């Protein structure tokens, strides 16, 4: 069993990842309309990098406070880091801006992103099972946070893929209320949920340490 430094050690670094996500998103929207195709392409890759690091940060919090066994902690940590670095490497490998709209490239990126997001459920479910299961108070604690992550992730996916409501009323939501705005609202709510969950996990380990 690992000896956790509650609120200390390397864990606090994970709290700033949501700030990195917001900063890279802001840079993307500031420079996304730049006349240079290279700048536009780089700003998009920077935005996706922020999303990748945000997802990895939440996974780290779950691993640090949810998985007490050394072997499983480092195993999950290795896989999460590998998926994160693979996403970043693929993202910045496509230096030619024309490739950013290539169907094969977009399919590969979506697949890798889905793998990183999907794997995040594995350590969460492991944390629930290793902390008493779904019917134990500690397991339910992690389960509630897991459902929150699932809700905001699905909300982001639905708003991004459905293109509602502008698909139903073209031109009516060009400035306010389009799906891209709802996407950002859900991302912001997800980041707030992530930060609150991390604080809750610290309080949990203060009351129920690894044994």
Image (cartoon, rainbow, N blue to C red):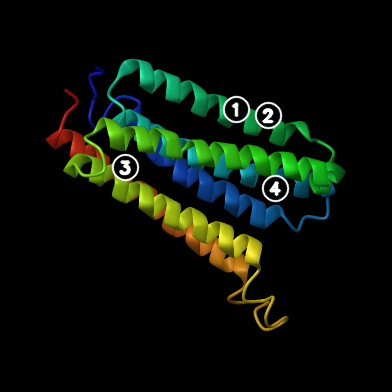
Question: Nearest the camera: 17 or 83?
Answer: 83
Q: Earlier in the sequence, mark 4 or mark 2?
A: 4
Can you name the residue that lies furthest to the left here? Answer: 207
| Left or right placement of residue 57 versus residue 71 in this view | right
N-terminal-most mark, 3 or 4: 4
Q: Which residue is mark 1?
A: 85
Q: Are marks 4 and 2 in contact (CB under 8 Å)?
A: no
Identity of the residue drawn at 19% across and 25% down: 210
Q: Secondary structure at mark 1?
A: helix
> Which is more N-terminal, label 1 or label 4?
4
Nearer to us: label 4 or label 1: 1
Would you say the residues marked 3 and 1 are in contact, meaning their CB atoms lie under 8 Å apart?
no
| Crowd rating for badge 4 (residues with CA inside 10 Å; few <14, some 14–19, many 20+) | many
Identify the residue under disc 4.
44
CA gap between label 3 and label 4 equals 28 Å
Q: Mark 2 = which residue? A: 89
* Of labels 3 and 4, the one closer to you: 3
Instruction: Residue 80 in the image: state x and y as whole percent.
Output: 50, 29
Q: Along the polypeptide, which appears first: circle 3 or circle 1?
A: 1
Q: For residue 49, which quarter of the picture?
A: top right
Q: Secondary structure at mark 3?
A: helix
Residue under numbered circle 3 = 198
- Which of the two discs, 2 and 3, labels the residue nearer the N terminus? 2
Q: CA distance from mark 2 to mark 1?
A: 6 Å
Q: CA distance from mark 4 to mark 2?
A: 14 Å
């Amino acid at each position: 069993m690992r000896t956790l430094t509650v609120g200390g050690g390397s864990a606090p670094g994970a709290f700033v990842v949501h700030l990195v996500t917001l900063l890279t998103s802001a840079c993307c929207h500031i420079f996304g309309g730049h006349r240079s195709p290279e700048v536009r392409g780089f700003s998009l890759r920077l935005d996706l990098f922020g999303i990748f690091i945000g997802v990895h940060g939440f996974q780290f919090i779950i691993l640090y406070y949810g998985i007490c066994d050394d072997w499983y902690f480092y195993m999950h940590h290795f896989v999460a880091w590998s998926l994160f670095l693979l996403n970043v490497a693929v993202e910045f490998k496509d230096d030619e801006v024309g490739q950013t709209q290539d169907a094969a490239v977009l399919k590969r990126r979506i697949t890798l992103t889905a793998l990183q997001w999907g794997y995040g459920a594995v350590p969460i479910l492991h944390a629930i099972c290793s902390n008493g299961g779904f019917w134990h108070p500690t397991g339910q604690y992690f389960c509630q946070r897991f459902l929150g992550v699932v809700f905001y992730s699905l909300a982001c996916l639905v708003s991004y893929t459905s293109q509602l409501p502008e698909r139903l009323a073209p031109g009516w939501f060009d400035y306010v209320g389009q799906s891209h705005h709802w996407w950002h609202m859900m991302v912001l709510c997800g980041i707030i949920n992530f930060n609150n969950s991390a604080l809750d996990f610290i309080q949990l380990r203060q009351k129920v340490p690894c044994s």
